[in-house]
Image: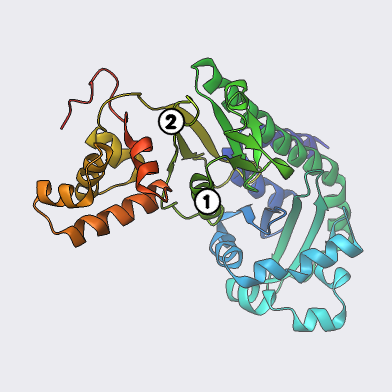
Amino acid sequence: MKSDENFADSLYEAALVPELWTQTCEKLAAEAQADCASIFTVDTYGNHRFVTTPNVAEAYAKFAASPHAQNNTRALRALERSPFVFARDIDVLTEKEFREDQLAPLFLHPNGIEWEAGCVFQEPSGHMIAIILMHAKGRGHFTDEQLAKLNLLKPDLARAAYMASQLGFREARSMADALSMVGVPAAVIGDTGRSIAMNNQMEALSPRIRTGAGDKIVLEAPGASALLDDAIRRYKAQAVPTVQSLPIASRDGEPALILHLLPVRRAARDIFSRSMAILAVTTVGEVGPPDMRVLCGLFDLTPAEARVARGIALAQTPETVAANLGISIQTARSHLKRIMQKTGTTRQAELVLLLSGLSVPGDGGKNP
């Protein structure tokens, strides 16, 4: 009993300190007399996160990146045929399914693993959580006594997982509120790409920035909205977005806005985190030509593109910009095309409205 109590303490500690999940998997394997233990979550988009004992970490990484992760017969059958109860793979798969299953020959056997037992359940948010134990080749399958032991641990495992998940939502609210305290409108975007927390300053920017159906963030400017959707897609795919600062031009006396999409960096072991990125908003200056450093930093413009953008912001034609910079009109137009792509604008007049006033506060636009 003392061992069970100590393990339960470790579970609830990991729910509060995500860095402890790997250590907790090692303790779970020891409690179950297994060779390895893993916990993985799958969101409603099929994205996998996992934490595991180090001896199978590489195998899990390959599995999560493979097409087989989107069609995991073992997890699906466990959810259908043995929900919330630990069971062996041979208990939830038919003989045909077990024979045709690709996980064993591709990921388990090459890593010295032969038998698997696990528990799969869904939390209220729709995320699937799986707790998996494995035996090495030559050890035989999990016994009924070992399964009974695991099912005694199951309530604490489930509560700790649910607690960690709920803390992820609370943390998102805290991040938005913290930015509110320094006057920054902000929304926290969850791992589904939808808003899970938005502070009062951000809500006050509606309808220029608002949430639509299913808490999807909607921008009034179509070009910026398309850039935001693309950036979120890239974040979900764990890739770096092409554009991470998104412009909304001034309108009806309202100042121009720049939306900054910032990734939430955390240990991969924090598999229950729900926050993927923060969308923060700053207001641009009202007068003066754009600052070169601001242009390059916000929109990832090259120095050559930034020089062209600065000329356009001063209402110069592409021909004038080319002459002033000593480049061909074709080069100036090529730069202009890329600038408009990076800023989400479709017309030169819209680009001028956006760029005017992007100067460093206190600089007066004098920085060359």
Q: Is residue 163 shown above or below 114?
A: above
Q: Is residue 87 shown above or below 274?
A: below
Check disc 2 and report its element: helix, strand or loop.
loop
Q: Identity of the amino acid at label 1?
A: Ala
Residue on which the image places disc 1: 226
Residue at x 67%, y 60% (from the top left corner): 35
The residues tagged by marks 1 and 2 sit, at their Cα atoms, a distance apart of 17 Å
Disc 1 versus disc 2: nearer the observer: 2
Residue at x 77%, y 71% (from the top left corner): 73
- Between residues 362 and 252, which one lies in front from this camera angle? 252
Quadrant holding the N terminus: top right
Residue 192: mark: none
- Position in image of residue 138 (x %, y %): 70, 74
- Between residues 41 and 318, which one lies in front from this camera angle? 318
- Between residues 103 and 319, which one lies in front from this camera angle? 319
In the picture provided, is 115 more to the left or to the right than 148? left
Locate residue 130: give its quadrant.
Answer: bottom right
- Between residues 7 and 274, which one lies in front from this camera angle? 274
Locate residue 86: give its quadrant.
Answer: bottom right
Q: Is residue 280 shown above or below 29?
A: above
- Position in image of residue 237 (x %, y %): 54, 57
- Position in image of residue 285 (x %, y %): 35, 24
Residue at x 55%, y 50% (from the top left corner): 229
Q: Identity of the amino acid at label 2?
A: Ala
Q: Can residue 366 be seen in this snapshot?
A: yes
Check disc 1 and report its element: helix, strand or loop.
helix
- Position in image of residue 225 (x %, y %): 54, 46
Residue on which the image places disc 2: 256
